[in-house]
Amino acid sequence: MKPGLKTLYYTLAAGILFFVAISTFLTWQAHDFLNTPPETYGREIVLDIQPGSTFDAVARTLRDKGLITNFKKFRMLARWEEKLGSIKAGEFRLNTSWTPIQILDAITAGQAMLHKLFIPEGLTWWQIGRLVDESGLASFESFEKAVHDKSLLAKFNIPFDNAEGFLFPDTYHLPRPRGKNAEPLVRAMLSAFWRHAGNKIWPTDRPKPKELARVMILASMVEKETGADAERERIAGVYANRIEKRMLLQCDPTVIYGLGTAFDGNLKRTHLKDKTNLYNTYARRGLPPGPICSPGFRSLEAADAPEKHRLLYFVSKGDGTHQFSSSLKEHNSAVRKYQLRR
């Protein structure tokens, strides 16, 4: 072999070996990066990605929090996977024991964190607002604003000046709203009312505003008066009978609601005589001007179809149920039996 060819041969061979070595090294590095998590024993980290965040900004945050080890390689991976523009907004629960591929999948195709919020039956809108505030999902002020939002009330066919009664009691799993804005939470509760209750009670045609108002107010009163399902239709029937006879409804929970946050737990005779309280059914005839809490489905059913009977009174027996009477004489006897002798 001629010296020139021999030199060329060795040069080409060396170049090929160098290329193979470099390729092998880069392949090993890529494999090592893709399959090696930052930590063996991982730490859970919640990453909050704001709407409009760029991939580079998110990747730098991932690096700073120890969720990836190399910004440039992570960016190359995203480009290779065609996910540079696929970042999702929301809170994501990540772990430092995850590989870069797992991290990338989580922030581009995963499910944002959902927060559990339990709303029990019988709460007022401001009590629900405090629960929301305590959960950290939204501020009380934002919740109050959303509950009184006229456009929102019109959208959900609410015939009152706030959403009292329509904030359906349920267990919600919700993403954290941006900027602690409560409107998405209130929308979810109003949607739940029609989905879980309204559309079942009125499956064909929604009631006219006046009828809807009547049912919602009566249902909220039933909800506050009893926790016994078997009594709900009966109590609704008592109030229906008293309305028909133009009797005062004399419902303590309505008076308490009218006192608002000023109520200290002690209902006084002066409260029952106060005619300035629009919810005082001891001094004003008929139903109060609006619901007094968020009723559950059973109370809504009862208010829509009260039991037919001649009963006009009921008194607590102290065991969660009530004694019902059709005359004042019977009622006074029941009061002496179950209340005055305690």
Image (spheres, helix red, strand yellow):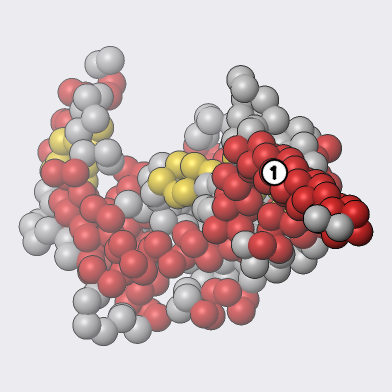
Q: Going by the picture, which residue comes out furthest to the top? A: 342
Query: Whole-percent x and y of residue 208?
Result: 35, 84
Q: Residue at x 16, y 36 (%)?
A: 323
Query: Whole-percent x and y of residue 187?
Result: 53, 65
Local SS, label 1: helix
In the image, 244 versus 232, the foreground residue is 232
Could you tell me how many numbered marks the image carries? 1
206 sits left or right of 184 in the view:
left
Q: Give the residue pinned by disc 1.
A: 24
Residue 151: which quarter of the image?
bottom right
In the image, 338 versus 36, the foreground residue is 36
* In the depicted structure, whether residue 256 falls above or below residue 179: above
Question: Does residue 136 appear anywhere in the picture?
Answer: no
Q: Going by the picture, which residue comes out furthest to the left? A: 309
Say few, some or many: other residues with alpha carbon within 10 Å of mark 1 (under 14 / 14 to 19 / 20 or more): few
Q: Residue at x 61, y 20 (%)?
A: 41
Query: Whole-percent x and y of residue 311?
Result: 13, 52
In the image, 96 versus 178, the foreground residue is 96
Question: Does residue 194 appear anywhere in the picture?
Answer: yes
Q: Residue at x 64, y 32 (%)?
A: 37
Q: Amino acid at mark 1?
A: Thr
Residue 12: which quarter of the image?
bottom right
Q: Going by the picture, which residue comes out furthest to the front? A: 1
Quadrant of image for the C terminus: top left
92 sits left or right of 194 in the view:
right
Query: Whole-percent x and y of residue 185?
Result: 56, 58
Q: Residue at x 50, y 34 (%)?
A: 267
* In the depicted structure, whether residue 78 falls above or below residue 24: below
1 sits left or right of 92 in the view:
right
